[in-house]
Image (cartoon, grey):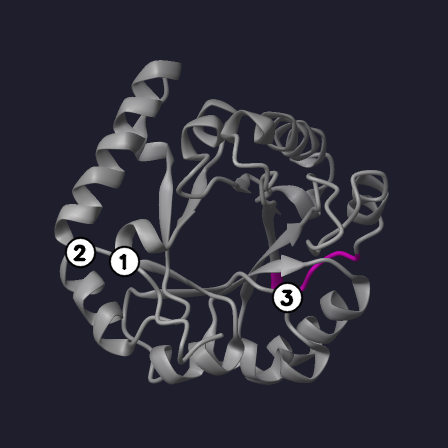
Amino acid sequence: MENNKKIIFERIDNACRACGRDPAELRVVWVSKTHPVSAVETAIVIGAVEFGENRVQEALEKFLPQREGIICRIIGPVQKNKLRKAVSVAQAIDSVADLESVLKLEVLCEEANKNLEVLFQVNASEEATKSGLSMQSAFDFLQSLPEPKRLIYKGLMTIGKNTGNPKDSKICFSFLRNLRDKIFNSEAKFSNFTELSMGMTDDLEVAIAEGSTMLRIGTALFGERNLKTHP
C-alpha cells in the first residue's frame, strides 16, 4: 500500500506542477469501500486521514468507535432511513442532492449536538446511472437552501464521464468549478463553500487542472476490491 501511495502522490505532484498549483491545496480521500478494517488501519499508519465509504453500514463497522483525527466521509447516496446512522459515524456527507435530506440532517445533527459538513452532488456527466442534481437545476436548488444551523455547506461533488477517456470529464469538472465560483460567498450561508470533490484514479490529472480540491482514490491505493464479499 505504501508503494501505491507513492505512485499516486507522484501523479498528483506532477499534475499540480503542470498547471501551476500547489499540491498542498489538494486532499486525498481514501475510498475504503469493500476493503477490511485492517486495510484502513494500514492506511492510517502510512498517513491517511480522510476515508470515503459508499454504504453507511460499512462505515459503522470501520469507523466506530471514532478515531481522533480520522475523518469518515459518506460518498454514496444515503437512503432517508439511514441518515441517522450516517450522522452517528460521519464527519461529512458528500452526496446530498435533495431538500428533504438537508432538513432531516439538520434535525438529526441538532439531536446529536453535532455539526456536519455536506457537499452537494451534481450529475455533471448527465448519465442516467449516476445520482445528483441535474446541471439545469443545481444553481436554483443551491440558492433555495435554508440558512444552515448544524450543517456546514462546504461545496460540490461530481463523478466524471464513464467513457474510458479522462479528457471527456473536463466539461463536467469545469461546470462544477464555475458553479462553485458563482455560489461561494454569494450569501452568508455559502461562506465556507470552497470544496470541489472531483477526480478519481483515471481522471485525477484533468480534475486537478480544473481546480479540484478533493480527490477520491480507491483501488489505486488499497488494491483490488474483494467483490465476492461486496457485490
Residue found 44% across the figure and 76% down from its top: 230
Q: Secondary structure at mark 3?
A: loop
Nearer the N terminus, badge 2 or badge 1?
2
Image disc number at residue 223: 1
Residue 27 in the image: x percent, y percent?
36, 44
Q: Which mark is residue 180?
A: none
Q: Which circle marks residue 1 in the picture?
A: 2
According to the picture, the residue beneath numbered tag 3 turns out to be 77
Amino acid type for the residue under numbered disc 2: Met
Q: Position of residue 127 (x, y in %)?
A: 72, 46
Give the x, y percent position of residue 73. Answer: 47, 63
Looking at the image, tell me whether mark 3 or mark 2 is earlier in sequence order.
2
Residue 198 coordinates in the image, percent (x, y): 52, 41
- Location of residue 223 by image quarter: bottom left
Question: Are there few (<14), some (14-19), or many (20+) residues within 10 Å of tag 1?
Answer: few
Query: Quick check: is 148 in the magenta stretch?
Result: yes
- In the rendered image, which quarter is residue 94 located in? bottom right
In what element is the residue under mark 2?
loop
Disc 1 is placed on an element classified as: loop
In terms of secondary structure, what is the magenta stretch mainly?
A: loop
Q: Amino acid at mark 3?
A: Pro
Dot 3, how many residues are within 10 Å of its Cα: few (below 14), some (14-19), or many (20+)? some
In the image, the segment drawn in magenta is 146-151
